[in-house]
Amino acid sequence: MLMNCKYTLICNIICISLEILKINEIRLTLQKSKNAVQYFRYTY
């Protein structure tokens, strides 16, 4: 029972960190596209 609990805790931590990474990636890509739009606006 304890082992199972420990594993689920570890899995939850991994899942949470993966979600955070995903969110950060999305935020980065959004920022990059915003920068690209601004860049194109300035050049054209």
Image (cartoon, rainbow, N blue to C red):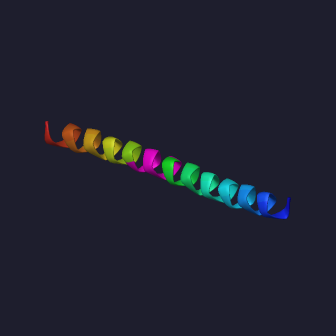
Q: Is residue 44 above or below residue 21?
A: above
Magenta-drawn stretch contains 24: yes
Task: Please state if 33 lies on the left or on the right of 19 as rendered.
Answer: left
- Pick whichever, 7 or 39, lies toward us: 7
The C terminus: image quadrant: top left
Q: Tell whether position 13 is magenta.
A: no
Instruction: Report the number of numbered marks.
Output: 0
Q: Residue at x 22, y 45 (%)?
A: 39
Counting from the top left corner in percent of width and height, residue 36 is at 26, 43
Magenta span: 23-28
Residue ID at (72%, 60%)? 7
Residue 8 location, quadrant: bottom right
Q: Position of residue 5 (x, y in %)?
A: 80, 58
State the image quarter where residue 43 is shown.
Answer: top left
> Which residue appears at 74% of the width and 59% of the height?
9
Of residues 29 and 19, the one drawn nearer to the viewer in this rendering: 19
Q: Is residue 6 left or right of residue 31?
A: right
